[in-house]
Amino acid sequence: MARKCVICKKIPVTGNKVSHSNIKTKKRHFPNIQKVRAVIDGVTQRVYTCTRCLRSGLILKPTMMKRPAPAVQTA
């Protein structure tokens, strides 16, 4: 899975996990990336984006198509 947001370019960062005895080991912190359908340049595409961009409204989701109601037959 892609670990980069297509909107804000957020990527994994590295840091240290520090134990109680102050021993440091490397750790990677990953952004919360989701695969969503979005309208980009008028075309609906599946893209990877972080939840911060989704919540902020930077992603325009496609409108849902409404299905016609089923025809009711009366006797």
Image: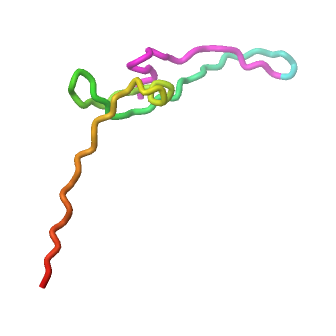
Residue 7 is drawn in which quadrant? top left
Residue 73 is drawn in which quadrant? bottom left
- Across and down, in percent, residue 46 comes to 31, 31
Question: As rendered, which of 23 and 3 lies closer to the eye?
Answer: 3
Q: Which residue is rendered at x = 24% and y = 31% of the image?
A: 44
Is 47 left or right of 52, judged from the image as shown? left
- Across and down, in percent, residue 25 comes to 72, 17
Colour logic: rainbow
- Which residue is the extreme one toward the right? 21
Q: How many marks?
A: 0
Residue 9 is drawn in which quadrant? top left
Q: Which residue is rendered at x = 73% and y = 20% of the image?
A: 17
Q: Is residue 18 magenta?
A: yes
Quadrant showing the C terminus: bottom left
What segment is highlighted magenta in the picture?
1-19
In this picture, is 55 found above or below 28? below
Is 9 left or right of 75, judged from the image as shown? right
Q: Which residue is rendered at x = 28% and y = 28% of the image?
A: 39
Q: Which residue is rendered at x = 21% and y = 25% of the image?
A: 42
- Which residue is the extreme one toward the front? 74
- Which residue is the extreme one toward the bottom? 75
In this picture, is 68 found above or below 8? below
- Across and down, in percent, residue 2 comes to 41, 24
Q: Is residue 41 magenta?
A: no
Which SS does the magenta portion mostly show? loop
Is 9 left or right of 71, judged from the image as shown? right
Quadrant showing the N terminus: top left
Is 45 left or right of 55, judged from the image as shown? left
